[in-house]
Image (tube, helix red, strand yellow):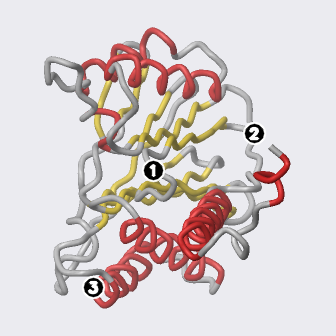
Amino acid sequence: MQAIQNTTPQTAGPLLSANWKAIQDLEDVRQVSARLFPQKLPRLASVAYSGVCVEANLAGGDFYDFFDNGPHRLGFAVGDVSGNGMASALLRSTLQASLRALRLTGLTSFERQLTLANRLLLESAPEAMYASLFLAEYDERSRRLRYVNCGHPTPVLLRGERASWLQPTATVLGLFSDWQCTIADVHLQPGDMLLLYTDGVTEATDLAGDEFGPDRLVAMLKVQNGLPLSMFLQECVGEVRGFAKSNPCDDLTLVGLRCLASR
């Protein structure tokens, strides 16, 4: 036992040294990946919000982010880079960093931000790799939600017992040089619940090959909507993983926003 404890990569041979280096590199990737998720959340009086991402591997292609867009305004994004592994993780980091950098420069136009992000992915991504993205801003003074859905799975808005979907308003990023988008908007009301997700949620399959699907997602939302938001998202992850009966083959990402009665 003592001999094992004293073994180091330098004394155990080149193979162990290589394995040790690979493990350390993966741990570095994991730590950087964790830092890419929001560390500080701006507070708003009229909305509660939270996000969760369960990565299938140490480095995944999903991400979510929240942005402080000034007084009474919250920006947020959910994205999913095609494929998996290190290539997807690197491209995800590129996309997320570009969105943060463009915001910090004071660029507020959705069209300009996303046009530049699309160009960056075209120049950086291997052929046939792309990203879906939902980018939005909520203004609590008007309760108006402006958004662009770039080929991303349609978020569901639950108002009472009625569910509606925020449909795509643009194509995915990174495939087309001639890229354009349309900005859509919706007014949120007290009690509304908006749930964003990646395809790892709705495309999770059970042992028979059936997908979790949007209908189960809405049913889950209606049943568990009364829970505190962070608990609700964890319950959703548990529902999806329980349905799949195994570890997910894709990342699972969920972001929830609940519109409150008080301002």
Q: Which marked residue is nearer to the observer: mark 1 or mark 2?
A: 1
Q: Which marked residue is nearer to the observer: mark 3 or mark 2?
A: 3
The number of numbered discs placed on residues in the rendered structure image is: 3
Occupied quadrant, residue 203:
top left
Give the mark nearer the N terminus: 3 vs 2: 2
Foreground: 170 or 95? 95
Give the CA separation, mark 1 to mark 3: 25 Å
In the rendered image, which residue does mark 1 sit on? 57
Question: x and y percent of residue 252 in the render?
Answer: 42, 40
Which residue type carries mark 1? Answer: Asn
Q: Secondary structure at mark 3?
A: helix
- Figure quadrant of the C terminus: top right
Q: Mark 2: few, some, or many residues within 10 Å (few <14, many ≥20)?
A: few
- Asked if residue 137 is positioned above or below residue 247 in the image, the reply reads below
Give the mark nearer the N terminus: 1 vs 3: 1
Q: Residue at x 44, y 79 (%)?
A: 113
Q: Seen in the image, is 176 located left or right of residue 48?
A: left
Occupied quadrant, residue 247:
top left
Q: Secondary structure at mark 1?
A: loop
- Asked if residue 30 is positioned above or below residue 227 in the image, the reply reads below
